[in-house]
Image (tube, rainbow, N blue to C red):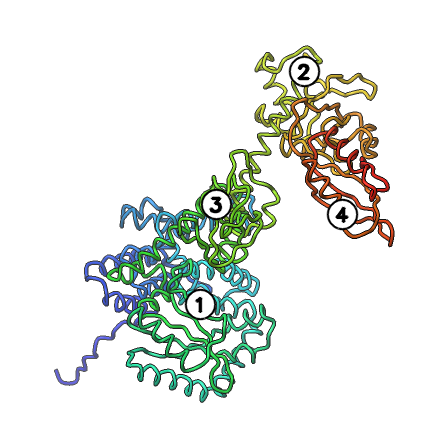
C-alpha cells in the first residue's frame, strides 16, 4: 500500500559468548563430525544455563571462560568428551549441578573429567597453602586415571593468566607464583611447550611487571639492531642446505622474556650477553635428514666443543626430541641451532596432547603417552607414602625441574635421572626394594660409595645385602622425589616399630618389679589407663614410652594401682627397680650411643630418656652422665648384652712424634688389628709433637685394649689415652 513503509526486521546483536561459540565450532569442524559438534553445542547450552547470571571480574559472562578453554583444547585437536568437559569444568564447583546429574545428562566419562578438575571444597581448618596442595594432589590422582584432566586444567590456567588484569595485586602475585612453580613445569614435563612458554611469559609479567617491561623494551630495540645479522645467517644456512639438495626449512627463533630473565639470573650475565645467542630451527622431513643437516651447518660454521646434545637418540623425559648445537657465526657471535623433523616439532609444541592430535603417527605419540604414564605412576607411588599434601608438593617440585643424565644398567637398559643424582637415586629408580637394601655399587666395574654422583654414559651395578636398611644420611644427597619419599617412609615406619618394641621391654621391666606381666593384665584395665592418658591404642602408649615421652615406671604404677584415676607421683627417694635394661647397641634409632663418651660393649653404662628420640646411652665416667643422674625420673640402669656384636666407634687421644710416616704407621697397626679409622682430628701440633684425636671402630672393650697395648709399644707414640668424656 502506498504511504506504508515496512521496516526490515532487526537482527539481534551477536553477544561475545555467541562469537566464541561460533569460533569454537569453526575450529571443531576441521576434525570432528557434525553429530559430535552437536553434542558439544548441547554441553555449551547446558553450561550457559547453569552459569546464567554469573560474571567474571572482567565483567564478561562467566560462560566465556569455559568456551575459551575449550577453544585452546580444540586447537590441540582434543576429542569430543574432552571438549565437553572443558565447557563444563566449573559447573560442579560454581553451580548447584552435581556430578551425578552431569553423568546422567552427558556421560560418566565427562562427569569424571569435570570432577577431576574441580577443586576440593569445604577444606576446614586448612591454610591456603595446604588447601592448594590438597587440590594439586587430588588433580594428580585424577590425572592418573585420565590425562585429559591436566590438559583441561592447563588450558583453564592459561585463560586465567590471560585475564589476570582484573584481579587485585596480591591475588595476581599468588596466582602467578603458583603458575610458575607448578603449572608451567607440569606443561614442560608433559612436553606441551607452547602452553608452557605462554604460562611462563604471563606468570613472569604478573610477578615482575617492571622487569618484564625493561627486558621487553630491550628485546624490541635489539631486534631492530640485529635484523641484518639474523637475515645473513638464515640466508647462509638455507643456501648451504639447498646446495646439499636437502628440502629443509630454516626459521628464526626468538627467546621469550621469561627465559631471557632466567638465563640472566642463573648465569649472572647482562642482557647483551644473553641476546648474543642467535637461535634458529631447521625442520626436516626424516630423521636421517636431521643428521645430514647437522653436518651441513658444522661445515658452514665452527661448532663450540661440548655444546652439542643429541635428544633424538636420547629423548628428554617429556618425550622432546631434537638436535642442539651452538656454532660461532659471522662477527664472532654464537648461533644456537635446533634441528628436528616436522613430527618432532609438533610433538615438542603439543607434547602429550599429540596422543589425540596425531593418532595416525603412532610411534612418537605413544612414546610420549608411555613416558607421561610412567611419570604419573612414580608420582602415585610418592603420594601414597607422603605424610601430607605439603610433603607431596615438595616432592613434586623436585621432580618438575629435571636436568637429565642418562646412565645404563648392567643389562644395557637406560635410566633417566636428574642432574646431581647419586647411586641411591639410581637404586630406587630401578626398584624400591633395591633402594632399601643397597650397600654400595660398581660404576664401570669399579667399586664406589653410595653418595657418588652419576654422569652421562656410566654403567651402574647396585650391590645389595639382605641386612641393609635405608640410612637417614641418604636424605642429604638424594636428588629424586621417589628416593626421598621412599627413604622417609621407611624410616618413619622403622623408627615407630623400634620405639614400640623398646617401649614394651621398658614397661615389662617395670611391671616385673610390681609382680605383674603385661600379657596377663586385664584388657579393661589397659583401656582405663589409655583413656586417662588420652591414648588411642596400646601401641601408641608403647611408642611414647620408647621415644622417652613417658616414664615407664609411672605408667607401670598407673596400671598396677586399683584406682587408675588417682594421681601418681614418684618420690625422689622412692626405690627404683634394680634390674637393668639389657641392650645390644643395634636397636636402631630409639637407642643411641652418646658421641661425647662413645661407650662400647664391656663398659659400665647408664641410659637416660631424651623425649622424642628414645634412650641415649653414656659411659659411667662421662661428665654429662653426672648431670643426668641428678634427674631421678629421667635415667635408668642399662647393661650390655653378652650377645652385643658389631663395630662400635671409640675415640683415643694420641701424642706422637711429628715426623713423616708416623700417621701411616699408626693406621697400619690399627688396620692389622681388624679395626678401621673413621676420623682423624689434629688437636695440637708443633715441630716435634703432634696431638691427634682418632675415632676408630672396635668390637668391644677387650678389642680396644689390645689395640692400645699394641700402639703403646711403638717408639713414635709418646702418650695414648681413651677419651671417655
**Mark number for residue 663?**
4
Q: Which mark is residue 309?
A: 1
- Between 358 and 176, the residue placed more toward the observer is 358
Task: Please tell me which of labels 1 and 4 falls first in the chain.
Answer: 1
Q: Nearer the viewer, mark 1 or mark 4?
A: 4
Residue 172 x %, y %: 53, 64
**How many C-alpha atoms fall within 10 Å of the one at disc 2: few (<14), some, or many (≥20)?**
many
Residue named by callout 3: 382
Cα distance in 3D space between marks 2 and 4: 52 Å
Distance between mark 3 and mark 4 Cα atoms: 48 Å
- Locate residue 296, reporting x and y percent: 37, 79
Residue 260 is left or right of residue 252, and the answer is right
Asked if the residue at tag 4 contacts the one at tag 1, i.e. Cβ–Cβ closer than 8 Å, the answer is no
Vertical side of 94 occupied by 295: above or below: below
Earlier-in-chain disc, 1 versus 2: 1
- Sequence order check, earlier mark of 3 and 1: 1
Label 4 sits on a secondary structure element that is: helix
How would you rate the neighbour count of disc 1 (Cα within 10 Å): few for under 14, some for 14-19, many for 20 or more?
some
Q: Residue at x 83, y 45 (%)?
A: 656
- For residue 533, which quarter of the picture? top right
Question: Which residue is at the far left?
Answer: 1
Given this view, does label 3 or label 4 mark the residue nearer the observer? 4
Report, in whole angstroms, how far the alpha carbon at label 2 lies from the one at label 3: 42 Å
Q: Nearer the viewer, mark 1 or mark 2?
A: 1
Q: Circle 2 sits on which residue?
A: 511
Q: Is residue 387 visible to the viewer in this orientation of the structure? A: no
Vertical placement of residue 391 versus 675, above or below = below
- Near-viewer residue (248 or 88): 248
Compared to 519, does 331 lie above or below?
below
Q: State how far apart marks 1 and 2 are (Cα).
A: 69 Å
- Of badges 2 and 4, nearer the viewer stands 4
Amino acid at each position: 500500500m502506498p504511504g506504508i513503509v515496512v521496516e526490515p526486521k532487526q537482527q539481534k546483536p551477536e553477544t561475545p559468548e555467541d562469537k566464541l561459540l561460533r569460533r569454537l565450532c569453526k575450529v571443531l569442524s576441521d576434525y570432528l563430525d557434525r553429530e559430535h559438534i552437536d553434542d558439544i553445542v548441547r554441553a555449551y547450552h547446558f553450561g550457559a544455563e547453569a552459569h546464567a547470571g554469573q560474571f567474571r571480574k572482567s565483567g564478561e559472562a562467566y560462560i566465556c571462560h569455559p568456551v575459551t578453554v575449550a577453544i585452546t583444547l580444540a586447537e590441540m585437536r582434543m576429542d569430543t568428551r574432552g571438549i565437553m568437559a572443558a565447557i563444563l569444568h566449573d559447573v560442579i564447583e560454581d553451580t548447584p549441578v552435581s556430578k551425578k546429574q552431569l553423568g546422567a545428562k552427558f556421560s560418566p566419562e565427562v562427569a569424571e573429567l569435570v570432577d577431576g578438575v574441580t577443586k576440593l571444597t569445604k577444606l576446614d581448618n586448612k591454610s591456603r597453602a595446604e588447601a592448594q596442595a590438597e587440590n594439586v594432589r587430588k588433580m594428580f590422582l585424577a590425572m592418573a586415571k585420565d590425562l585429559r584432566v591436566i590438559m583441561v586444567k592447563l588450558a583453564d590456567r592459561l585463560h586465567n593468566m590471560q585475564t589476570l588484569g582484573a584481579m587485585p595485586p596480591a591475588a595476581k602475585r599468588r596466582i602467578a607464583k603458583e603458575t610458575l612453580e607448578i603449572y608451567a613445569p607440569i606443561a614442560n614435563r608433559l612436553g606441551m611447550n607452547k602452553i608452557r612458554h605462554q604460562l611462563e611469559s604471563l606468570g613472569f609479567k604478573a610477578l615482575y611487571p617492571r622487569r618484564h617491561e625493561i627486558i621487553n623494551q630491550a628485546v624490541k630495540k635489539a631486534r631492530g639492531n640485529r635484523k641484518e645479522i639474523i637475515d645473513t645467517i638464515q640466508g647462509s644456512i638455507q643456501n648451504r642446505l639447498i646446495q646439499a639438495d636437502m628440502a629443509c626449512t630454516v626459521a628464526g627463533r626468538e627467546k621469550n622474556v621469561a627465559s631471557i630473565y632466567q638465563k640472566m639470573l642463573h648465569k649472572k650475565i647482562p642482557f647483551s650477553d644473553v641476546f648474543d645467542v642467535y637461535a634458529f630451527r631447521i625442520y626436516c622431513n626424516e630423521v636421517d635428514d636431521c643428521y645430514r643437516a647437522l653436518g651441513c651447518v658444522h661445515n658452514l660454521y665452527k661448532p663450540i666443543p661440548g655444546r652439542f646434545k643429541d635428544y633424538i637418540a636420547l629423548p628428554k623425559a617429556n618425550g622432546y626430541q631434537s638436535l642442539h648445537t651452538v656454532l660461532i657465526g659471522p662477527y664472532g657471535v654464537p648461533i644456537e641451532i635446533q634441528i628436528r623433523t616436522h613430527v618432532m616439532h609438533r610433538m615438542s609444541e603439543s607434547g602429550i596432547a599429540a596422543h589425540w592430535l596425531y593418532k595416525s603417527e603412532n610411534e612418537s605419540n605413544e612414546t610420549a603417552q608411555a613416558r607421561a604414564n610412567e611419570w604419573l605412576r612414580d608420582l602415585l607411588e610418592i603420594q601414597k607414602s607422603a605424610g601430607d599434601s605439603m610433603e607431596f608438593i615438595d616432592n613434586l617440585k623436585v621432580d618438575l625441574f629435571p636436568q637429565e643424565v642418562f646412565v645404563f644398567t648392567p643389562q644395557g637398559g637406560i635410566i633417566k635421572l636428574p642432574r646431581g643424582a647419586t647411586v641411591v637415586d639410581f637404586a630406587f629408580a630401578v626398584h624400591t626394594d633395591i633402594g632399601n637394601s643397597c650397600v654400595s655399587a660398581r660404576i664401570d666395574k669399579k667399586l664406589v660409595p653410595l653418595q657418588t654422583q652419576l654422569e652421562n654414559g656410566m654403567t651402574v651395578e647396585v650391590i645389595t645385602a639382605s641386612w641393609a636398611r635405608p640410612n637417614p644420611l641418604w636424605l642429604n644427597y638424594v636428588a629424586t622425589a621417589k628416593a626421598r619419599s621412599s627413604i622417609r617412609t621407611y624410616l618413619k615406619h622403622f623408627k615407630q616399630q623400634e620405639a614400640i618394641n623398646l617401649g614394651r621391654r621398658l614397661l615389662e621391666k617395670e611391671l616385673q618389679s610390681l609382680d605383674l606381666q603385661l600379657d596377663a593384665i586385664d584388657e579393661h584395665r589397659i583401656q582405663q589407663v589409655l583413656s586417662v592418658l588420652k591414648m588411642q591404642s596400646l601401641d601408641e602408649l608403647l611408642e611414647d614410652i620408647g621415644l622417652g615421652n613417658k616414664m615407664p615406671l609411672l605408667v607401670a604404677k598407673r596400671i598396677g594401682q586399683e584406682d587408675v584415676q588417682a594421681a601418681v607421683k614418684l618420690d625422689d627417694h622412692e626405690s627404683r627397680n634394680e634390674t637393668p635394661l639389657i641392650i645390644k647397641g643395634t636397636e636402631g634409632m630409639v637407642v643411641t650411643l652418646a658421641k661425647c663418651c662413645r661407650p662400647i660393649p664391656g663398659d659400665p653404662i647408664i641410659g637416660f630418656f631424651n623425649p622424642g628420640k628414645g634412650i641415649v646411652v653414656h659411659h659411667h665416667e662421662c661428665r654429662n652422665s653426672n648431670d643426668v643422674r641428678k634427674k631421678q625420673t629421667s635415667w635408668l640402669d642399662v647393661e650390655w648384652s653378652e650377645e652385643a656384636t658389631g663395630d662400635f666407634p671409640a675415640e683415643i687421644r694420641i701424642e706422637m712424634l711429628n715426623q713423616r710416616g708416623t700417621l701411616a704407621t699408626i693406621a697400619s697397626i690399627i688396620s692389622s688389628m681388624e679395626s678401621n679409622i673413621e676420623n682423624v682430628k689434629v688437636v695440637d701440633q708443633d715441630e716435634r709433637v703432634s696431638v691427634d684425636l682418632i675415632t676408630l671402630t672396635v668390637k668391644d672393650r677387650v678389642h680396644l685394649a689390645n689395640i692400645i697395648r699394641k700402639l703403646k709399644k711403638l717408639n713414635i707414640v709418646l702418650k695414648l689415652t681413651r677419651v671417655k668424656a
